[in-house]
Image (tube, grey):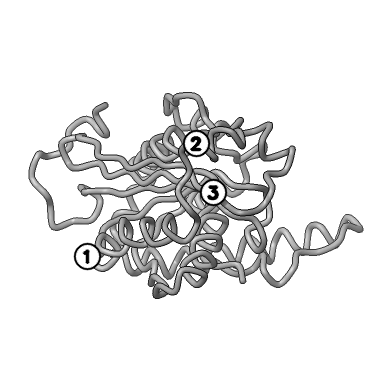
């Protein structure tokens, strides 16, 4: 797969030209404060479009909810046969991400607070250090900021359709990661002012943009008589 037409084969000093990393977790459920991974994918795409990937199943040690299983279709039999023990999986994920983060390379995750929150929880369980996440990019936050008034769903499949990104079969960690990498590139191509920021500044701006969105959404929900957001919903990239 060619990541982006026109990418130079050499590594540029500008962060947009890569290499880029992406990661995704398939999980036991939808609450990042209690649920755990059942599948992890980490993907590296170099400036020439070459892909390196590490995808593995995880034994979470807790039950998979029916709702989660209906989405990712990962079975207990698969996990029992191929899964990595949770603490080993945490250390493996930490090792895969710590070096590119230290080097300031883009780390992309869709709805990143979900995956990052779970990642930080399992890092703590495994006794490894927190990651700084200073080069994290979340295409959901970018889309909410730059397409603020567009109606409709902002799930990964819907954003890929809107930005003309072709996908594989989503809701598997590898396919979701590849789609998220391509989606993020397309958003930055459409809004080149993003690339004018340093990766560190973009990280800080995403924190601000997320809080702006959360404040707006919280006010809207309360105006309609719904329950407002929780304190966790205002935090990014770790919702703890």
Q: In screen coordinates, is 153 left or right of 100? A: right
Marks 1 and 3: in contact by CB < 8 Å?
Answer: no
Q: Residue at x 75, y 64 (%)?
A: 229
Question: Which numbered disc covers residue 103?
Answer: 1
Q: Which residue is mark 2?
A: 81
At 47% from the left and 39% from the top, the residue drawn is 173
Foreground mark, 3 or 1, reads 3
Which residue in the structure is indicated by mark 3?
59
Q: Is residue 10 visible?
A: yes
Q: Is residue 189 above or below residue 121?
A: above
Seen at 25% across and 33% down, the residue is: 4
Q: State how far apart marks 3 and 2 are (Cα).
A: 10 Å
How packed is label 2: few (under 14 Cα within 10 Å), some, or many (20 or more)? few
Tell me: residue 77, above or below residue 33. Answer: above
User: In the image, residue 68 lies at what x, y percent?
Assistant: 67, 40
- Which type of secondary structure does the marked residue at label 1 adopt? loop
Q: Nearer the viewer, mark 3 or mark 2?
A: 2
Question: Relative to the observer, which residue lies in front, 138 or 82?
Answer: 82
Looking at the image, is 36 positioned above or below residue 198? above
Residue at 33% of width from left, 43% of height from top?
A: 54
Q: Residues within 10 Å of mark 1 (few under 14, many from 20)?
A: few
């Amino acid at each position: 797969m060619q990541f982006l037409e026109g990418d130079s084969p050499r590594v540029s000093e500008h962060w947009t030209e890569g290499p880029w990393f992406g990661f995704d977790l398939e999980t036991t459920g939808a609450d990042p404060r209690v649920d755990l991974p059942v599948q992890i994918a980490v993907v590296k795409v170099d400036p020439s479009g070459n892909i390196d990937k590490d995808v593995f199943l995880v034994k979470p040690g807790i039950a998979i909810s029916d709702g989660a299983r209906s989405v990712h279709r990962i079975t207990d039999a698969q996990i029992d046969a191929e899964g990595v023990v949770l603490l080993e999986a945490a250390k493996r994920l930490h090792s895969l991400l710590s070096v590119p983060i230290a080097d300031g390379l883009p780390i992309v995750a869709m709805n990143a607070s979900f995956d990052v929150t779970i990642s930080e929880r399992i890092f703590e369980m495994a006794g490894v250090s927190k990651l700084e996440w200073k080069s994290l990019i979340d295409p959901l936050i970018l889309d909410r900021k730059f397409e603020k008034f567009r109606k409709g769903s902002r799930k990964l499949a819907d954003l890929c359709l809107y930005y003309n990104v072709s996908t594989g079969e989503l809701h598997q960690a590898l396919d979701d990661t590849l789609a998220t990498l391509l989606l993020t590139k397309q958003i930055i191509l459409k809004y080149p002012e993003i690339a004018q920021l340093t990766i560190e500044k973009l990280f800080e701006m995403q924190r601000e943009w997320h809080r702006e969105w959360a404040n707006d959404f919280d006010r809207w929900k309360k105006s309609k008589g719904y329950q407002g957001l929780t304190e966790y919903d205002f935090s990014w990239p770790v919702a703890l």
